Image (spheres, helix red, strand yellow):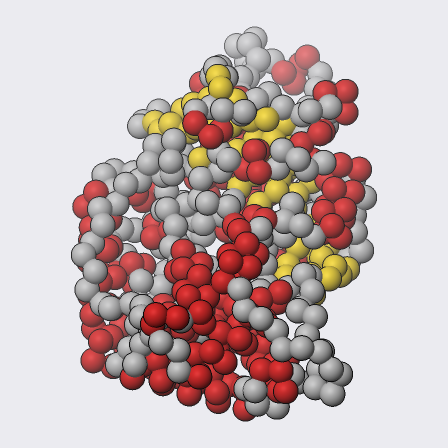
């Protein structure tokens, strides 16, 4: 909404024929904007923060109707004399709880000058929650299922949609990005702030862009970290995740091929990939304990994504190829660590409602065709899950409004941060979002992390801090380097064969910064 300057009009023009001045229509959200915020310590692990619960309309088209709760957290600026306002945050999902983000950012420079605000979006956690019943599992979690299994995947997605609709009450159709943006503006008004600043990760980049589109005069500086592609909302976004996993595996295979003497998996990308497929076939015939072909495919995607783990991943493949026994299966054990990380990233919160705000194909044969292709070409990182029917294929409600068409008109140039090897929000999303909004782009080269700020990359932190604190934009297109690849010499350059450490893999995964948040 725009604020228009008042025009100085003569007294004669202000008077009506009855001698009274014409009145502006009442603000339908006035009661929500003027409600008091009663702050108290948050509960449990968030006790260092303040929390409050506000109310907002369920349906903004009928603000006098039903209401929902919004739970908000806050950490006031540590340096009160340098305070420059509020920084709203969102962790993504869709459906991720945002209450803990101010705590995650406590040691950042942003926490010195901003009141950092976290919000549980509508449908999530401490806010009025959308609690969907769980549907029984029908399909086996197979990375390369046979055609005969496809119908089970569709049936499971249909059952999950029906279960969510049955327990979604009257709120489900109002759980959307546009309404979450409207909720943010209610919180802004309650806090008495004319503008907000914004840091959003993953889906939170789309939410921030929607907020700026809907409320351009209320947004100041904004950082969109790991951006979704504005043209891929939402079906194509997930298909592209599988492609990104494959690209990471191919980059890993090329690196391993240059070190054939160390790993013994071949001397080219294609030779290494052929060995990977031999191991996959071997595990299909004879799993090593719980490590099956499907879990191996998942481990390949995660391990290739994170460059510091490339040597470990090569060692896992080498050990599994050698014929490990379950009683002493170091490679399988390390692979399972990676597999668990991949499975944890598949679903979250109110995902199955917000991602249905756009239309998906409803013909299951479209998905089956994709599944056949993804099974062969993109098995790594559970790629086929991204091509299979999902709840939105069988959407049982009609969204009350179309997705917002993103545009920037009226708020300052922002910053997009994107890593080249990110599988959750693929690199192409960064340049596309930056171009759509006229933002400046920071590319993190040779990096697979998802969520870069405050995750250990000093270059990213410095550029973002300089912008959000001092207002200085980075270059229109600039670069930061990602975490280094393992220090394993190429063939002919000497060096010992690398060792494998499942504990080292877990330690790296636990220290990924934002991506490692629970």
The extreme top residue here reads: 19
- In the picture shown, does residue 298 fall above or below 514? below
- Regarding residue 295, the answer to whether it shows in the image is yes
Number of numbered markers: 0
- At horizontal 52% and vertical 10% (from top left) the residue drawn is 18
Image side of residue 170 versus residue 414, left or right: left
- In the picture shown, does residue 46 fall above or below 321? above
Q: Nearer the viewer, residue 77 or 322?
A: 322
Q: Nearer the viewer, residue 135 or 343?
A: 343
Q: Nearer the viewer, residue 38 or 291?
A: 291
Residue 216 in the image: x percent, y percent?
62, 40
Q: Quadrant of the N terminus?
A: top right
Image side of residue 509 versus residue 267, left or right: left
- At horizontal 29% and vertical 84% (from top left) the residue drawn is 285
The extreme front residue here reads: 327
- At horizontal 63% and vertical 52% (from top left) the residue drawn is 452
- Regarding residue 354, the answer to whether it shows in the image is no
Q: Nearer the viewer, residue 508 or 158?
A: 508
- In the picture shown, does residue 135 fall above or below 65? below
- At horizontal 44% and vertical 61% (from top left) the residue drawn is 337
Residue 278 in the image: x percent, y percent?
42, 87
Residue 43 in the image: x percent, y percent?
43, 24
Residue 306 in the image: x percent, y percent?
58, 64
Image side of residue 154 versus residue 16, left or right: left
- Quadrant position of residue 422: bottom right
């Amino acid at each position: 909404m725009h604020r228009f300057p008042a025009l100085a009009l003569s007294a004669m023009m202000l008077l009506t024929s009855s001698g009274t001045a014409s009145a502006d229509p009442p603000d339908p959200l006035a009661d929500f904007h003027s409600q008091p915020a009663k702050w108290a310590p948050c509960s449990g692990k968030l006790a260092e923060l303040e929390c409050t619960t506000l109310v907002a309309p369920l349906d903004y088209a009928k603000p006098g109707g039903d209401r929902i709760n919004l739970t908000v957290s806050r950490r006031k600026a540590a340096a009160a004399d340098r305070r420059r306002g509020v920084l709203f945050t969102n962790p993504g999902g869709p459906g991720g709880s945002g209450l803990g983000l101010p705590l995650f950012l406590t040691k950042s420079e942003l926490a010195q000058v901003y009141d950092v605000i976290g919000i549980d979006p509508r449908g999530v956690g401490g806010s009025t929650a959308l609690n969907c019943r769980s549907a029984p599992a029908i399909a086996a979690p197979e990375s390369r299922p046979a055609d005969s299994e496809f119908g089970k995947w569709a049936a499971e997605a249909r059952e999950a949609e029906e279960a969510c609709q049955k327990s979604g009450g009257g709120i489900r159709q109002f759980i959307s990005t546009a309404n979450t943006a409207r909720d943010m503006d209610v919180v802004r008004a309650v806090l008495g702030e004319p503008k907000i600043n914004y840091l959003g990760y993953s889906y939170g980049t789309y939410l921030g862009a929607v907020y700026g589109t809907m409320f351009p005069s209320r947004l100041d500086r904004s950082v969109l970290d790991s951006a979704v592609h504005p043209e891929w909302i939402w079906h194509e976004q997930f298909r592209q995740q599988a492609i990104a996993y494959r690209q990471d595996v191919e980059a890993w295979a090329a690196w391993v091929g240059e070190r054939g003497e160390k790993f013994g998996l071949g001397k080219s990308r294609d030779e290494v990939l052929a060995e990977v497929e031999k191991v996959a076939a071997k595990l299909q015939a004879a799993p090593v304990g719980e490590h099956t072909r499907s879990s191996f495919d998942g481990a390949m995607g995660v391990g290739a994504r994170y460059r510091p783990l490339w040597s470990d991943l090569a060692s896992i493949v080498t050990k599994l190829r050698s014929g490990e026994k379950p009683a002493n299966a170091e490679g399988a054990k390390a692979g399972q660590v990676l597999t668990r990380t991949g499975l944890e990233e598949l679903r979250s919160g109110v995902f199955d409602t917000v991602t249905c705000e756009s239309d998906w194909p409803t013909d299951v044969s479209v998905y089956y065709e994709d599944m056949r292709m993804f099974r062969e070409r993109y098995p790594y990182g559970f790629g086929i899950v991204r091509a299979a029917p999902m709840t939105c294929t069988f959407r049982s409600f009609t969204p009350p409004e179309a997705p917002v068409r993103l545009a920037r008109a009226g708020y300052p140039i922002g910053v997009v941060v994107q890593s080249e090897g990110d599988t959750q929000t693929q690199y192409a999303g960064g340049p596309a979002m930056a171009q759509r909004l006229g933002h400046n782009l920071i590319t993190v080269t040779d990096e697979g992390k998802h969520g870069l700020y405050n995750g250990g990359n000093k270059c990213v932190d410095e550029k973002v801090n300089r912008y959000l604190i001092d207002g200085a934009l980075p270059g229109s297109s600039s670069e930061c380097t990602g975490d280094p690849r393992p220090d394993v010499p190429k063939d002919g350059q000497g060096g010992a064969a690398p060792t494998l450490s499942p504990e080292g893999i877990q330690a790296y995964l636990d220290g990924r910064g934002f991506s490692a948040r629970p």
